[in-house]
Image (cartoon, rainbow, N blue to C red):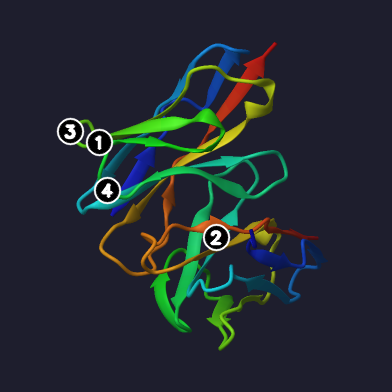
C-alpha cells in the first residue's frame, strides 16, 4: 500500500517570492512520483513527474521537484511565484512495476499568492 | 495537442436514478482510469482498464460499473444514485511505455438531488 502526505493544507506566499510545497510518501515498492495542479473548477494538469534517472526534475510553469529516496520526499519548488500560480497542488504516487494501477493522491496544498 | 475528452461536463440526477459518464482517451493511449473527487477532497481512484480488460480496482462502489470499448473509450455506469455520489468524476489516460503517466480530462460534475 502507498500513502502520500502533504504537510501543508495552505501556503500563503507573496508574489515573486520563492515557494516550496512539501510531499512525503510511503511505499513498500518502487514508485513513480507526480505533481498535478488544479485550478478552480478545472481538471488536473500534470506539472512534472519522476520516473527514474536524475532526481531533480523540471516541469512546466517554472516548477521543479527533487526526489529524495532516503527521506521519501518529493518537494515542489518555484523560485518566483505569480498570481496565476494560485491553485490547488496535488502530489501523487504510482506503482512503478508496470500495469495500470491507480494513483494515490495527497490531500492537496492550496497555494495562495498575495500581491 | 489532443486531450482526454469527457462527456457530459455537467449532469444533474435524482436519487435512485442512473448515470453514464463517457471518456475518450488521448489518441494512441491504451489505458483508462476513473477517479472520484468529492468537494474539497483529493481524487480517489475507482477503476482502470488496459486494452479493454479491467486492470486495477480501487474504492468503486458495487453500484458502479465500467468498461472499455474496442475504440478505447470508456464508460462509467452509476446506478441507484445517492446524494453522496455528488462529485467531480475524472477520467485519465496513459500509454504503457510512458511510465503510465496519467493525463486527466476536465471532469464531469455530477449533482445528485
Say which quarter of the image contains residue A48.
top left
Where residue B9 sits in the image (x, y, percent)? 77, 61
Left or right: where A114 falls relative to A46: right
Q: From the image, state whether disc 3 or disc 2 is nearer to you.
A: 3
- Which residue position holds label 4? A52
Where residue B89 sits in the image (x, y, percent)? 64, 60
Q: From the image, state whether disc 4 or disc 1 is nearer to you.
A: 4
Say which quarter of the image contains residue A98.
bottom left
- Which residue position holds label 1? A72
- Which residue position holds label 2? B35
Where residue A4 sits in the image (x, y, percent)? 37, 41
The Cα atoms of the two marked residues, 3 and 1, are separated by 6 Å
The Cα atoms of the two marked residues, 1 and 2, are separated by 25 Å
Residue A1: assigned label: none
**Callout 3 and callout 4 share a chain:** yes
Mark 4 or mark 1: which comes first in sequence? Answer: 4
The Cα atoms of the two marked residues, 4 and 2, are separated by 25 Å
| Residue A86 visible to an observer of this rendering | no
Relative to A71, say whether A50 is above or below: below
Q: From the image, state whether disc 1 or disc 2 is nearer to you.
A: 1
Mark 3 or mark 4: which comes first in sequence? Answer: 4
Say which quarter of the image contains residue A76.
top left
Cβ atoms at labels 3 and 4 below 8 Å apart: no
**Callout 1 and callout 2 share a chain:** no
Q: Nearer the viewer, residue B86 or A42?
A: A42
The Cα atoms of the two marked residues, 3 and 2, are separated by 30 Å
Amino acid at each position: 500500500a502507498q500513502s502520500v502526505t502533504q504537510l501543508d493544507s495552505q501556503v500563503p506566499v507573496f508574489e515573486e517570492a520563492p515557494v516550496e510545497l512539501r510531499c512525503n510518501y510511503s511505499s513498500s515498492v518502487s514508485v513513480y512520483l507526480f505533481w498535478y495542479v488544479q485550478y478552480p473548477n478545472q481538471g488536473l494538469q500534470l506539472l512534472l513527474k519522476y520516473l527514474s534517472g536524475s532526481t531533480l526534475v523540471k516541469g512546466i510553469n517554472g516548477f521543479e521537484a527533487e526526489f529524495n529516496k532516503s527521506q521519501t520526499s518529493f518537494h515542489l519548488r518555484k523560485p518566483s511565484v505569480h498570481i496565476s500560480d494560485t491553485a490547488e497542488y496535488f502530489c501523487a504516487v504510482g506503482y512503478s512495476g508496470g500495469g495500470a494501477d491507480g494513483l494515490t493522491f495527497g490531500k492537496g496544498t492550496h497555494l495562495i499568492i498575495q500581491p | 495537442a489532443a486531450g482526454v475528452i469527457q462527456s457530459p461536463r455537467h449532469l444533474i440526477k435524482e436519487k435512485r436514478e442512473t448515470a453514464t459518464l463517457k471518456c475518450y482517451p488521448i489518441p494512441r493511449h491504451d489505458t483508462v482510469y476513473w477517479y472520484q473527487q468529492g468537494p474539497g477532497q483529493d481524487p480517489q481512484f475507482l477503476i482502470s482498464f488496459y486494452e479493454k480488460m479491467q486492470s486495477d480496482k480501487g474504492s468503486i462502489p458495487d453500484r458502479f460499473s465500467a468498461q472499455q470499448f474496442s475504440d478505447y473509450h470508456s464508460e462509467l455506469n452509476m446506478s441507484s444514485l445517492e446524494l453522496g455520489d455528488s462529485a467531480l468524476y475524472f477520467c485519465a489516460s496513459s500509454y504503457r511505455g510512458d511510465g503510465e503517466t496519467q493525463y486527466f480530462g476536465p471532469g464531469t460534475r455530477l449533482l445528485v438531488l
